[in-house]
Image (cartoon, rainbow, N blue to C red):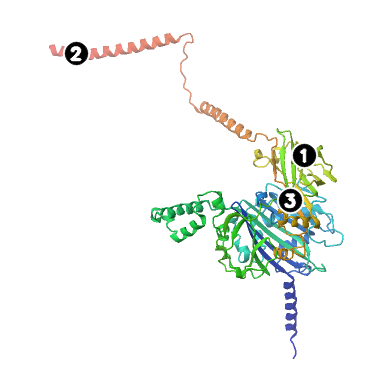
Amino acid sequence: MKVHPMLGFRLIAFLIFSALVYCENFDEELLIKDLGHGYTAFHFNFAATTSESVFHSKHYNILPKPIIQILKKYDVDEFHLSISRGIWDERWGSNFISVSPSGAELWAWFGSQTTSVDQSWFKLTHALSGLFCASLNRLSTNEHFASPIHSYKPSGVPKFSRVSREVRYSQLPGEALCSENLTPWTKYLPCKSFSGLGSLLRSTSLFKSNYNTMTIGVRRVCLDLECHEIGLELMETLTVVFDRSLLFAKRTLIYNLLCFHFVSGYPLSILPYDLQIFSNETTEMFCSFRECSLSNKASHSQTPWSIRSILGSEFKGFCDAANTSRVFILTSYEDMNIPLDNKLKVDCLDNRVLAAYSTKDLSTQFISFPFKTSGKESSPEHSPLVSATKHITGSGSVRGGVKAFLTSRADFNLKIVYFDLIPWYTQVFFSSLKIYGLDPKTQNKTVITPNWLAVKPSLARKRIGSIELVITLPALNQLIITYEFRKVLQRWNEFPPDANHGFFLPAATVSYVLNSEQIDYLNKTKHTASHNLNLPNWASSYNQFFNTTHSAPHDGFVRLHTPVSLVTMPTPDFSMPFNVLCLVCSVVAVVFGSVHKATTTVFNVTLQQNASDSIITHLINRILTKKNTSKTMSEQNISTSAPSNHDKND
């Protein structure tokens, strides 16, 4: 049988297309965790991988075309972008990702073939600024980016055997996360917000949270264990934390009122009409669970909640483009009852997971099932192994200082890397740099010498400065880093719109790596830091991480940030032009009125009076004139009445 050549060509094209589609993979995950004290965290993780062959083609199925074009055009090996609002509280335990600083953070590695890294960085920031509707173009100048040496290493595999050292890092602390950033971020998902876990993303509900972070990053990863084939990985994450005591304050007040009426035996008919829609069965169920406790923080934390009641959206079904779609319910600070059917659970080998489900097996109504917390502690609060914070010291408008605190809760010494950006409007005196350790028990201070130190002074309006040091953090001790700076005077057009609010100082970065022995020690002692949820570099999804922990340990890399600081600068009185303008306008208005009256009034000629006449003489003359006038009028009246009398006598 003879096959038509056109049919054979179509068959070959179909096989090639099928192979390309097979090379691409997409996984979506939702992690739910009750953080205790009435807080609930949701972490969305979307990971798409593709092979290098698809990267060089002109058609893309999973990875978005704009991202691929940016990597090609600007020779970017790897980049990571995060925009955050709020601060991650240490009482919540370990974060799902490396905690990002408040505002925007962008760092990228460029290939060795890049002719001008600064020019590529300039174009990259402007391209990402347009894609995500953010002010990232402000990071393109030397005043905002630096090149750290040890703090930021490539998280993916290098494209070539020799890794390029061209890295750019920058922060924009004043950038706020809003729906304009979330909308284009959602469009880069294969199913967008039409189906899958992306359909749960509703901006009007997400921005009612206390903390939210949006990230997107691209890196090169190994597609097999031997790393014979290298592919691209696009990872998008969204972390939100809700305070249910604020979110359900009105609803909890209503339930308390219903509970009081139910126990007291009062009929619901005496309540307002809008509260009579609650049935007695609903009120009885709620009261039996709540035990009719009054509204307080504990009762808020025990209020039943569901995914739909918090996110305010509907699940629109499984995403057909996803290979796996999982929902993980993690162990929490308090005991939690899971309303989903145990028969639908997916096997998970990690003890940090209470239950795992595939959205393909769940109905679309699973987001409406109520979760309940008992209020009883099931595990101790998770404190991080190392915590960092930074404060501004000094007073006045001339000089100031920075004091950073690094607290270790480990029983062993840690070698950390501290990296801090210095804006050009704070001129640091590096001779004032001091590093000393503080023993919390004895309060004794010891001077510590860093293992490695690199400083780069800032230049006014030309270059940002930086401090990077490698130092050993003693066990169960506190490390204090201090330095002083001088506040540089700003030009009038360099102040932000709200000048009196102050200027943001970028957050400092603290990085460290735990070796295998230290990780084993934390696991044996059941230290709270062993519950770290950050994805290691070898894992692309939590499904892979949770099910291979027994054979592939965590890589031990941890990066954290201090809070963003605010420094007040010498600020001119920007209201002075307004005040001067008002004063000038008032004066001009008064002068204009007088001049206008003088130039438009018609003058009449009068006889000039004798200047020697006094005021008293003038008054006497007026009185005499008035008297003579009245006398003359009386004489005229007499003369007119006389003839009439004469005629009468005749």
Q: Identify the amino acid type marked 2.
A: Pro
* Residue 637, image quadrant: top left
412 and 586: which one is in front? 412
Q: Is residue 127 visible?
A: no
Residue placed under numbered mark 1 in the picture = 482
In front of the other: label 3 or label 1?
A: 3
- Of tags 2 and 1, the one toward the viewer is 1
Res 385 label: 3
Which residue is disc 2 drawn over?
643
Please tell me in which quadrant of the rendered image residue 629 appears.
top left
Q: Earlier in the sequence, mark 2 or mark 1?
A: 1
Is residue 7 rendered to the left or right of residue 114? left
Q: State the CA–CA distance, disc 3 to disc 1.
A: 22 Å
Q: Indicate the amino acid at tag 3.
A: Leu
**Label 1 amino acid?**
Thr
CA gap between label 2 and label 3 equals: 131 Å
CB atoms at circles 3 and 1 under 8 Å apart?
Answer: no
Please tell me which residue is depicted at 72% across the width and 57% down the height of the picture. Answer: 534
